[in-house]
Image: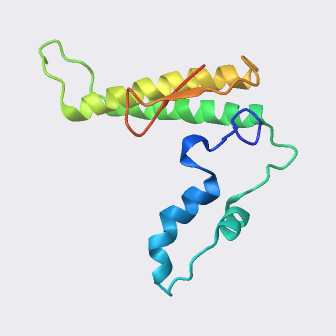
Amino acid sequence: MRGGGVLEYSGGELGSDQLRYERRFAPFSVFSTPPVVRYGQFIAMTTVPLPPHITAQALYTDASNQFSATKKLIEGLLSPPAASQQTVSRREEELNTLLKVAKTNSVVAKLLAGGYKKGVPPSFDFDAHPFFPIMRL
């Protein structure tokens, strides 16, 4: 989303990316092996410019396809609901939450691929799951 110019990070109250990077890895500077990677080296190694033939819409389309594939896999893992089964196991509860995330994100990515609300960054809602956010427009 940063590559498409949709998502910009200002740093806000936490400071710049460089400051957070340096503070996060400062405790490891006392070790000689492996050598400490400076922020400039880190950016050079992790920043990959998008080739001109790959667009933000293509990435959104791929994301939608991946979320759809995830949805199908999770549906295959869920056991069919039995009429006599009153309790839902912790595993099934987690899978149902992940299914909700995959379904919603598939639809949102498809909308973004189609140009819906172009230039408006989606928000990320971690209420449903602490690690996998739901994208909201």
102 vs 18, left or right, is left
Residue, x 51% and y 63% (percent of image)?
A: 23
Residue located farthest toward the bottom when viewing the structure as drawn: 32
Horizontally, residue 73 falls left or right of residue 40, namely: left
Q: Residue at x 20, y 33 (%)?
A: 90
Question: What coloring was used for the rendering?
Answer: rainbow
Note whether 23 is above or below 12 in the view shown.
Answer: below
Residue 85 image point, x, y percent: 13, 18
Instruction: Check the image and name the residue furthest to the top.
Output: 83
The reply, left or right, for residue 7 in relation to residue 127 is right
Placement of the C terminus among the 4 image quadrants: top right
Give the residue displayed 74% in from the left and 56% down from the top: 48
Image coords of residue 64 (percent x, y): 61, 30
Q: Position of residue 126 (x, y in %)?
A: 43, 31
* Left or right side of 48 for 131: left
Quadrant the N terminus occupies: top right
Q: Nearer the viewer, residue 31 or 86?
A: 31
Instruction: Using the rendered view, name the quadrant where residue 86 is placed.
Output: top left
Count the labels in the image: 0
In the image, residue 44 sits, relative to residue 86, either above or below, namely below
Instruction: Give the residue at the far right of this rendering.
Output: 52
Q: Residue at x 73, y 65 (%)?
A: 44
In percent of width and height, residue 98 lies at 39, 31
The quarter of the displayed image where residue 47 is located: bottom right
